[in-house]
Amino acid sequence: MGVYHVSGLGLSPGALTMPLTCVYILQAAARFGHEEARKFFELSGEAPRKGSYEKHKGEPEAIIVLDSKEAIQGGLPLRYESRWFKMQSNGKEPIEKPIVKYICKLLSHLNGILERQGLDGISPPKYLYLVTVDYQDFENALDTAGALLLGFERKEVWVNLIGGSNQLNLALMIAGDYTMIPARYYYVFQNSMRLEPEWLEKLPRKREDFMRSADVILNRWYDLPPLNLGYGDILRRLIDEFSYRQVISRSELEQIIADAGYGRPSEFIPKLISTRYIVPLGKDVFGSGGMLERVKTLFEKIEEHRENLRNMDIKRYLGDKMKEVEFSC
């Protein structure tokens, strides 16, 4: 089983192809014997079991892009260039075209080198999915991201956090943290619209180039640890308690906080009040706050997706919002 890379995107496809280039160069470097590149992928893939074996872990199997309807349909001019493969944006075109063209050129180059050295080539992605999202609407982005991640819950999902709007990346992080599906959140930055990493000296052509490039990539790649964004055990318990009653006592609230592992419950209560998760209704009595109601509404929708997807695949479920593009080199 390969990796499913999920990424928000705008009009600069390099925000997707640049980190994927890093992944592919690390795959090649691992084949050449770069130990840290090998370790980068060692926890990927299926757990070892009888009849299941992956010779090369961590290869991208699917690319999932969340973008606007206009970008997906080719109604807006894109911004990109590749100095490695002499590619340049030239007006309006569907977002998948430069992505597919660039990755095919890159893999053709890498596989030519690997195969001449008697090493295994790298497989191209099997799937490319384009998912329409309102990137300016956080709630729409969260709803879409939640459904999408649940649709791939049996896959190994990595989330790219450098493409698309702030609303979209925040939605991917929160949906990912809530569903606990992504195995990795990552970012690796550059300032230009290049499809490849601008900070690599050159396109690798021999073993020494791959070893050197892998060192640079691993120094720039950053894995973001899973985040606790405030709607963990405490909020789940509060939502459950307020589902059948109007108020909760201070002693009960302190016990909920203590059960979640916070050592000084009385000092945590003001944080819940200031963030509007609870409101004081009298001496040592609290009610549900507006933010708790909002959290409940947002995540009830994701739970509805979870239930609906038990008997339906994600492509059918999202319908016209999800387009599969043939990845053909």
Image (cartoon, helix red, strand yellow):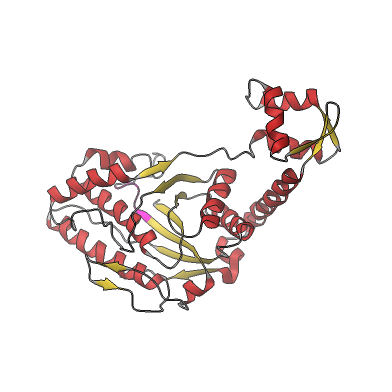
Residue 167 position, x and y percent, is: 55, 56
Residue 7 position, x and y percent, is: 45, 57
- Indicate yes or no whether the magenta region holds residue 275: no
In the image, is 75 to the left or to the right of 55? right
* Residue nearest the observer in this picture, 133 or 136: 136
Compared to residue 60, the image places residue 285 above or below, namely: above
In the image, is 224 to the left or to the right of 131? left
The part of the image, by quadrant, that contains residue 197 is bottom left
Compared to residue 266, the image places residue 14 above or below, namely: below
In the image, is 314 to the left or to the right of 110? right
Residue 22 position, x and y percent, is: 30, 52
The magenta region covers: 56-60
In the image, is 204 to the left or to the right of 72? left
Residue positioned 37% across, 43% down in the render: 222
Q: Main secondary structure of the magenta part?
A: loop
* Residue nearest the observer in this picture, 263 or 95: 263
The part of the image, by quadrant, that contains residue 244 is top right
Considering the image in quadrants, where does the C terminus appear? bottom left
Q: Is there any visible trace of residue 51 in the rendered image?
A: no
Residue 212 position, x and y percent, is: 18, 46
Residue positioned 37% across, 73% down in the render: 97
Residue positioned 71% across, 23% down in the render: 266
Compared to residue 5, the image places residue 318 above or below, namely: below
Q: Is there any visible trace of residue 150 in the rendered image?
A: yes
* Residue nearest the observer in this picture, 328 or 182: 182
Q: How many marks?
A: 0
